[in-house]
Amino acid sequence: MIFCLRPITASRFIKGGGTIDYPCLKYVMNRLANSFLKMLFRIRFNDTTNAFKAYRREVIDGCRPLIAPHVNLTVELPLKAIVRGFSWTVIPITWRNRRSGVAKLNIKEMGSRYLFICLYIWLEKNLSRGDYRKC
């Protein structure tokens, strides 16, 4: 059991982490998206799109209102937590491609939703004058 006062997020791309059978196109798209987020938000975290995260209730409450109705919530929560002043802990994980079935993520459909969330939070960061920041 992990007990930590800060939100925990995992990274496949740090020492100790890794990927197994990661599709080449998916890898390239992932690295481009995460590089874009690192530059846009000026953060060091390199795997924002990873869905493996753990949050304390106060962090989730501090990120409200949540507007993402889909899997893009996995990007909304960490970006809002960072923009609003919460710190985080990163742990390495190993990601393994599914052995059966087909992924339901449609890049054309979800890409615009991810971009909307990212730009929405970027506007909050740059135009809200810190109104949402943790006290």
Image (spheres, grey):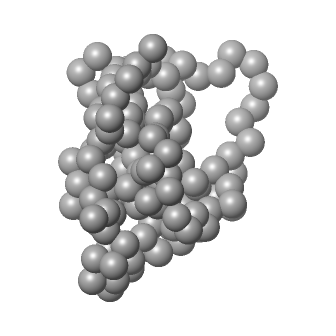
Q: Residue at x 37, y 39 (%)?
A: 7
Q: Nearer the viewer, residue 88 or 29?
A: 88
Q: Residue at x 75, y 19 (%)?
A: 100
Q: Residue at x 75, y 31 (%)?
A: 102
Q: Residue at x 63, y 50 (%)?
A: 71
On-image quarter of the C terminus: bottom left
Q: Position of residue 34 (x, y in %)?
A: 37, 50
Q: Nearer the viewer, residue 33 or 124?
A: 124
Against 94, is 75 above or below? below
Against 98, is 127 above or below? below
Q: Nearer the viewer, residue 109 or 85?
A: 85
Q: Position of residue 72 (x, y in %)?
A: 58, 55
Q: Position of residue 48 (x, y in %)?
A: 40, 46
Left or right of 37? Residue 95 is right
On-image quarter of the N terminus: top left
Q: Nearer the viewer, residue 63 or 72?
A: 63
Is residue 41 in sight in this rendering? no
Location of residue 101 (image quadrant): top right
Numbered marks: total: 0
Location of residue 104 (image quadrant): top right
Against 39, is 9 above or below? above
Against 39, is 51 above or below? above
Q: Position of residue 35 (x, y in %)?
A: 31, 53
Is residue 132 in sight in this rendering? yes
